Amino acid sequence: MLKPVPKWLRVYLISDRKLFSPDAFLLKVEAVLKAGIRSFQLREKDLASRDLLELARKVKGLTHKYGTRLFINDRIDIAHMVSAEGVHLTESSVGAREVKNHFPKLLVGVSTHSLDRAKEAEEEGADFVTFSPIYETASKKEYGPPQGLESLEEVAEALNIPVLALGGIKIGRVPEVLKAGASGVALISDIWNSSNIEHTILEYKAFFGGE
C-alpha cells in the first residue's frame, strides 16, 4: 500500500548533463518538463559555484514555466538564491533540521543508504528520502552492493515520510519497488537515455494513475 505522497513527487528525475552536449541539455530539460515531470533535482556536483548558479537560474526558469518543483543538490545557498522549491541533501550534508531552521520554506529531500540514516533524516524533519541503491547501477557503486527489495521494505515500513526507490530503476521494476513499500521512484538514466522521453515518462506516471 502506498503511503500518502504528493502527486508531484512520485516520479523524481535527477539531472546528468554529461549525457548531452552543452547546447542540448536545457532542451532535454524542457522536454522532460513538458512531458510531465513535476519534481526535478539539479545534481551537477562537478560545476564551480558560479557555473552552477548560472545553470540553476536557467533551469529554474524552465521549471517555473511548467509548474515543476526544483531541488538543488546539496547547495542550500544556490537553492535559496534561485528561489528553488527545495534542496536535496546527502548523508554528509548539514542536517535537515538546520535547513528547516534557517530556510523554513525549503522542501528537503535526503539521500540515504541505510535504515539508521533514513530514520535520522525523518527525525530531523526531512520531507522525503531517497533510498539507494536498490539494484546494481554504475552511478551508485561508491555506496556498495545493491540494497535489494528487502532493505527497501524495511525502510519504507519504518518511516512515515515518502521513501523513493533509487538506483537501477527501470520501468519493469516499478511494480516490485512499489510492492516493497516505495512511495515513488527516483531515477536518472532510464528517462534521459530513452529514445522516446515523452512515452517513457507517461509509462512511469501510469503507475500512479497517470498523474
Image (tube, grey):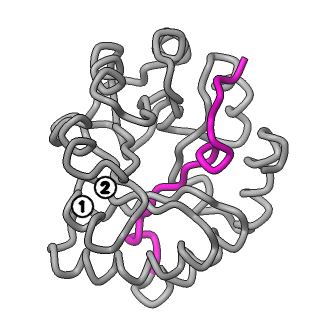
Q: Which residues are magenta?
A: 1-20
User: In this orientation, which residue lies closer to the viewer: 6 or 49?
Assistant: 6
**Residue 39: percent from left, percent from top:** 55, 56
**Residue 119: percent from left, percent from top:** 34, 17
Looking at the image, which residue is at 68% across and 25% down?
178
Label 2 is placed on what type of residue? Asn
**Residue 149: percent from left, percent from top:** 55, 17
From the viewer's perspective, is residue 178 above or below residue 41? above
Judged left or right of residue 112, residue 40 is right
Judged left or right of residue 199, residue 178 is left
Upstream in sequence: badge 1 or badge 2: 1
Mark in the foreground, 1 or 2: 2
Magenta segment includes 8: yes
- The residue where tag 2 is placed is 73
Q: Marks 1 and 2: CB-CB under 8 Å?
A: yes
Judged left or right of residue 189, residue 17 is left
Instruction: Categorize mark 2 by other alpha carbons within 10 Å: few (<14), some (14-19), many (20+).
Output: many
Q: Determine the CA span between mark 1 and mark 2.
A: 8 Å
Magenta segment includes 57: no
Say what secondary structure mark 2 lies in: strand
- The residue where tag 1 is placed is 45
Label 1 is placed on what type of residue? Lys
User: In this orientation, which residue lies closer to the viewer: 83 or 116?
Assistant: 83
Looking at the image, which residue is at 26% across and 72% down?
81
